[in-house]
Amino acid sequence: MTLNPDNVTSYADAFINALIDYSPKLISAILILFVGIYAIRLINRIIRKIMVKRDLDPTLTRFLADILLWVLRVLLFVSFISKLGIETSSFVAILGAMGLAVGLSLQGSLSNFAGGMLIIVFKPFKVGDVIEAQGTIGTVHEIQIFVTKLINGNNQTIFVPNGSLSNGTIINYSLQGYRRADLTLSISYDTDIRKAKDIITEVLKNNPKVLKTPEAEVSVKLLTDSSIQLAVRPWANNADFGVVSSDTLESCKLAFDAAGIVIQPFVKEVSKK
């Protein structure tokens, strides 16, 4: 097959003429692309500074800034291809169909996403709070968009989906600043109740980490077949809660031993045949 020089020249001239005719669109599209990239970075930086100055939650600030960044990028891309002369209506329709398909396939993730937004906006807890939710107790280490990261007492990391977390019951132990310990001591029916209560009350008064207000409570909780159960309810700051609970039990046991009071062990009744 031989090439006709006249045809080659004709094709080259047609290509050059098309390139010259198309060059204004190409140059303007490239100019829009570079200016748009710079403008998006500038807008994103300004928006982040504004949200930081308004003391918005860091997680919410990062998330909103990322969403704005991707929305602006999509708009820039549509503007870029539109300036090149490419029809955008079909592209937008395809993008919408893809979004719908992805949304249907990620319903669980979208639920977690919505739950994360509710947690960030309404703030039932914050980083550093001790919470109980979905059958687990831990300190909130990080609030992410889809999951919340907890660290329990064994230093284990627990990831709780935000969807179930936002729709379930959340107990925030840190919100009020102090907590009440609910302890139980069992004594025999031979023991003087008032004497035992006085001993416990004195133990609580001598513990500097037990709060004076609200006042600690010592009362009869239950009369069982084998013992008298005394409810001991001291109040303590969140940081001292665990120490107050263990110290109260230990000090009460030592004080009972010194007074000759025996703590009644739990007795399980077994039927005899």
Image (cartoon, rainbow, N blue to C red):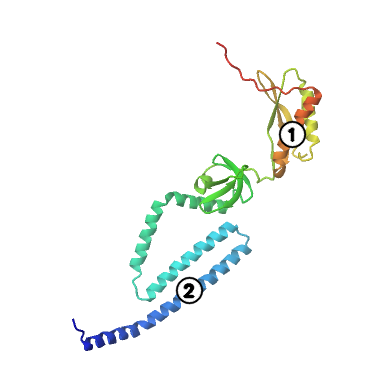
Q: Which residue is mark 1?
A: 248
Could you say where residue 248 lies in the image, as x and y percent from the top left?
Answer: 74, 34
Marked residue nearer the N-terminal end (2 or 1): 2
Residue 131 position by quadrant: top right
Tell which tag, 2 or 1, sits nearer the viewer. 1
Q: CA distance from mark 2 to mark 1?
A: 66 Å
Image quarter where the C terminus lies is top right
In this view of the protein, which residue sits in the foreground, 161 or 251? 251
Q: Is residue 139 visible?
A: yes
Left or right: 122, with 183 as reference point: left
In this view of the protein, which residue sits in the foreground, 142 or 214? 142
Q: Residue at x 53, y 61 (%)?
A: 64
Could you say where residue 150 lies in the image, as x and y percent from the top left?
Answer: 58, 47
Q: Residue at x 39, y 79 (%)?
A: 26
Circle 1 sits in a helix, a strand or a loop, which is it? helix
Circle 2 sits in a helix, a strand or a loop, which is it? helix
Identify the amino acid type marked 1.
Thr
Tell me if mark 1 has few (under 14), some (14-19) or many (20+) residues whose alpha carbon lies within 10 angstroms of its own: many
**Relative to residue 63, is residue 230 depicted above or below?**
above
**Relative to residue 203, is residue 114 depicted above or below?**
below
Left or right: 178, with 18 as reference point: right
Q: Residue at x 72, y 20 (%)?
A: 188
Q: Which residue is mark 2?
A: 36
